Image (cartoon, rainbow, N blue to C red):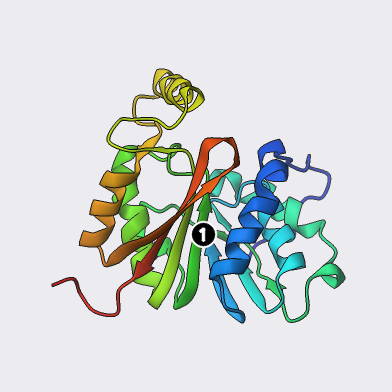
Amino acid sequence: MMAAPDRSRRVLFSAACERNKAPILAVLQQWLEPPARVLEVGSGSGQHAGYFCRQIAGLTWQPSERAEALVDLAVALAGLDPTGLARGSRLDEPLELDVRRPEQWPRGPFDAVFSANTCHILPAAALPELLAGSSQVLRPGGLLLLYGPFHDGGVHNAPSNAAFDAHLRSIDPAMGVRDAIALGEQARDLGLEPIAEVGMPAHNRMLILQRRAAPHA
C-alpha cells in the first residue's frame, strides 16, 4: 500500500496527452469491449488514465510507473474527482512497474495492456521485455495497444519523425523511434500477433497486437 501522496507537490501536466487523448479514446472505444480491465504501462502524468475512465463505462484502469516517477503519478491521480468517472468505471491505485523486472508485473489476466510514447524512450533491449510481460498478463485474445511514432525498416513516415529519432539517439543511443516490422516479429515469438495498425495525428500510430490462445506453431 502506498503512503498518502504529498498534495503539495507540483502536479504533472503533458501537453502531448491533451492533444492525443481524444484520438486515442476513439481507438479504445473501437477495440475494447467493456467491462474491460486495462493495465497502462508508463502512465506519466495520469491524464490518459483519468480521461479514459471518465469517458468509457465499465473500465477498470490500472496505472503504473517506474519507482522514480510513481509518487508524482499518485499525486496527479489523487486530485481527480472520483464522482466524475463513467458508470461502472474504476481507477486503481498506481503501482510500481519496471518492465525489465518480471516480478513487478501485476497479476492478470488483463483484457488489454496500453502504453503511449514509451517504446522510443525504453532502451531497445527492454522492448522484448515489454512484449513478454504484456503477453504474460493478458488473457488469451487480449490486446496490446502501443501508441507513438514508429518506422518501417528504417523508413520514416515523416521528416519530423526522422528528426525526432536523431534527437533521441543524440541524447541516449539506447533510445530511438522503433521499427514496427521488427517489433511485430519479436512479438510473434512471444505469443502476440500483430492484427491492426491505426494511423494517428502528428504521424503517430497505434499498433494493435493480440495474445494468441495457444503457442505459435
User: Which residue is found at the position 65% from the left and 59% from the top?
Assistant: 25
Q: Indicate the quadrant where residue 86 lies.
A: bottom right
Image quarter in which the C terminus is found: bottom left
x%, y% of residue 204?
52, 41
Say which of 207 and 117 sits in front.
207
Number of marks: 1
Vertical side of 119 occupied by 216: above or below: below
- Of helix, strand and loop, which one carries label 1? strand
Image-based side of 6 in relation to 186, left or right = right
Say which of 164 and 39 sits in front.
164
User: Which residue is found at the position 39% from the left and 77% from the top?
Assistant: 141
x%, y% of residue 212?
30, 74
The reply to whether residue 62 is in sight is no
- The residue beneath circle 1 is 114
Image quarter in which the N terminus is found: bottom right
User: Which residue is found at the position 37% from the left and 54% from the top?
Assistant: 130
Vertical side of 57 occupied by 199: above or below: above
Say which of 122 and 51 sits in front.
51
Image-based side of 18 in relation to 128, left or right = right
Say which of 102 and 132 sits in front.
132
Q: Indicate the quadrant where residue 105 lies.
A: bottom left
Vertical side of 103 occupied by 185: above or below: above
x%, y% of residue 191?
26, 67
Say what amino acid the circle numbered 1 marks: Phe
Residue situated furthest left in the rendering: 217
The reply to whether residue 208 is in sight is yes
User: Which residue is found at the position 86% from the left and 72% from the top?
Assistant: 83
Image-based side of 183 in relation to 79, left or right = left
x%, y% of residue 196?
41, 59
